[in-house]
Amino acid sequence: MVYNWSDLRLLFHPVFPCLLCGADTDSPAGLCLPCQADLPRIAHPCPRCGEALATTTGLPCGRCLKHPPPFDELVAALAWETPVPGFVGALKFRERLPAARLLGHLLAAAVADRPRPDLLIPVPLHGRRLRRRGFNQAMEIARFTARCLDLPLLPTALRRNRPTPPQQHLDARQRRRNLRGAFELARPLPARHVAIVDDVVTTGSTVGEIARLLKRAGAERVVVWTAARATKRLE
């Protein structure tokens, strides 16, 4: 069989329909470049918690200055605005795993210039929820991010030792109370610089609880890498 040049290009650079507009793209993220450029991002994030600020000052927000979070830095690939909730919802509730590839690649691009951690740890699901859903969305995102950056991924480092009610209907104080003592280390921590990977951060309660645990276990630096960050903090 004789292939022409376009046939050979397709063998090595497969083309897919863009997840948003349907146009052909060979981007590994699954979105064409114009659609990637149009995605919502936080223009002026706090360098500590990643929350949206009015302007860039290079300093942490007032809340972080008064009450620093347990983690040292939070980097979000996207803001929690349309169409991002649709991507995350498609992954979590409709098993659209290409959305994990998209979010993982975008997260890798967002953190590419940050200091490299020793390993990535996805936020775990409780076993009951994992069996019901069939997969952990944070793990699927972390898998692609780790692959893009050639970083080790340790999915079994943490356990969620008790089921907790869904966080989305709780305020910030209730979220903290809900998660107190909900995680434990499944093995000794083999790293000093760790990145926690999650799909979306709202108040930071979940990743904050994990960061406290990792610091108590000997981690010197704990950062949070999340596919999306809520632009308004729940009080």
Image: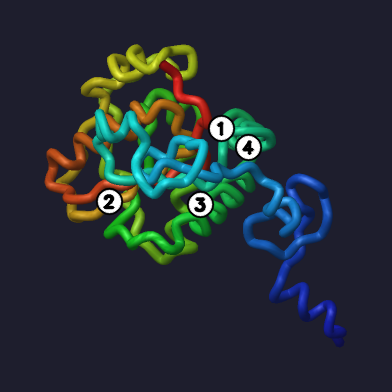
The residues bearing labels 4 and 2 have C-alpha atoms spaced at a distance of 26 Å
Between tags 4 and 1, which lies in front? 4
Which amino acid, by three-letter code, is at mark 1? Lys
Q: Mark 4 sits on what residue?
A: 84
Query: Considering the numbered disc 4 on the image, is that residue within a helix, a strand or a loop?
Result: helix
Q: Are marks 4 and 1 in contact (CB under 8 Å)?
A: no
The residues bearing labels 4 and 1 have C-alpha atoms spaced at a distance of 12 Å
Residue at image point 58% right, 51% down: 101
Query: Considering the numbered disc 1 on the image, is that residue within a helix, a strand or a loop?
Result: helix
* Residue 18 sits above or below residue 128 on the image: below
Sequence order check, earlier mark of 3 and 2: 3
Query: Considering the numbered disc 3 on the image, is that residue within a helix, a strand or a loop?
Result: helix
Residue at image point 66% right, 45% down: 39
Which quadrant does the C terminus fall into?
top left
The label on residue 107 is: 3
Which amino acid, by three-letter code, is at mark 2? Val
Q: Mark 2 sits on what residue?
A: 194
Which amino acid, by three-letter code, is at mark 3? Leu
